[in-house]
Amino acid sequence: GMMLLLLIVAGLGVVTLLVILFAPHIRKYAAGGVCRSTVSLDGKTVLITGANTGIGKETAMELAVRGARVIMACRDVDKGEEAAASIRAAHPETQVEVRELDLADTCSIRAFAQKFLGEVNHLHILIHNAGVMMCPYTKTIDGFEMHIGVNHLGHFLLTSLLIGLLKRSAPARIVVVSSLAHNFGWIRFHDLHSQGSYNSGLAYCQSKLANVLFTRELARRLKGTDVTVNSVHPGTVNSDLTRHSTLMTIFFTVFATFLKTPREGAQTSLYCAVADELHSVSGKHFSDCAPAFVAPQGRSEETARRLWDVSCELLGIEWD
Ligand SMILES: NC(=O)c1ccc[n+]([C@@H]2O[C@H](COP(=O)([O-])OP(=O)(O)OC[C@H]3O[C@@H](n4cnc5c(N)ncnc54)[C@H](O)[C@@H]3O)[C@@H](O)[C@H]2O)c1
């Protein structure tokens, strides 16, 4: 017994030593791709959802530094203003503005869009970044399950309201922040809102698969418009996304060295938003600033069309 304990302790010691020794290499690997484009965004307008924290805030800052007017659409305006102030403090020349948008409320989305359309003449880059992960079972104001409601349906409605403006501003790009988690999801058409049974992890995966399918179908419909749309896996990023799950929070804290920083996590969104070589690439999925694997269920045109129709029906909109 004593011998075994000693062996375990020694083993753990060796592993710890190796991790410490190789930490810089692990960091380098975890950091993943970097957006190397130097494109300037002077005169361009960018809209990004959930921009007051994590990946969204870093994405907003970088695009603003490149000269764009960046509109940060946030559920909590005070937190949004705080984030905007910290961006301005670090980069006084930037143009960042905050607007209220709650993706869990279609009235808020419509009010936001109406105001936005009255305020801006162009929209060149739209980034669907906001997301909720593994929250307890909750419904949006409109009665949608929170993950599918915010991560997919909210962004679906927002896009439908701004698509005319994007087309008029072409060339324009849409970036949908999905996840590797889409691999573990499937669209439960018989119970999209998990009323029968709820698993917060699966509900998240379903919504991130919906992001991939939406990207695919929207790209098909936008052919010939010079508006492109691509989806992104940002990497495993040390952010507040895990706030609803104690287990995930512990996991993310323990393995922090293996994770990307929000700044590193923003690179693939930035790449899809600005890289010259992607000017006519649409309907694709990216990770580490490179094309990435899409699960078979994310490649099904049939599922993508069906989800499109169901989404229109749930939102009470016509969009063809
Ligand atoms: N962190 C990761 O490891 C990881 C991995 C894969 C994908 N992602 C995706 O990246 C995106 C950004 O996540 P993050 O890691 O920066 O986490 P985060 O929690 O810091 O950012 C999410 C943002 O979405 C906003 N949001 C949530 N509900 C909203 C609502 N109803 N209306 C408006 N805004 C709302 C939050 O306020 C927050 O600002 C998410 O879509 C997430 O699914 C993250």
Image (tube, rainbow, N blue to C red):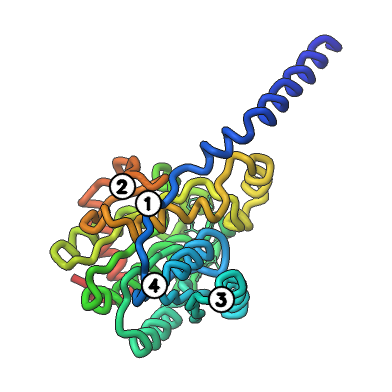
Task: Give the percent coordinates (x, y) of residue 158.
Answer: 36, 74
Residue located beneath label 1 in the image: 209
Write down the residue under mark 3: 92
Q: Are marks 4 and 2 in contact (CB under 8 Å)?
A: no
Judged left or right of residue 88, residue 148 is left
Residue 318 in view of the camera: yes
In space, the residues marked 3 and 1 are separated at their CA atoms by: 38 Å
Type of amino acid at the residue the image marks with label 3? Pro
- Return the residue at label 2: 298
Left or right of residue 271: residue 281: left
Task: Check contact, mark 4 vs mark 1: CB within 8 A.
Answer: no
Amino acid bearing label 4 = Val
Which of the numbered marks, if any, corresponds to residue 46?
Answer: 4
Query: Neighbour class for label 4 at 10 Å: few (<14), some, many (≥20)?
Result: many
Kind of residue sitting beneath label 2: Gly
Q: Earlier in the sequence, mark 2 or mark 1?
A: 1
**Is residue 199 among what the camera can see?**
no
Q: Is label 2 in contact with label 1 (beta carbons under 8 Å)?
A: yes
Q: CA gap, disc 3 to disc 4?
A: 18 Å
Q: Quadrant of the C terminus?
A: bottom left
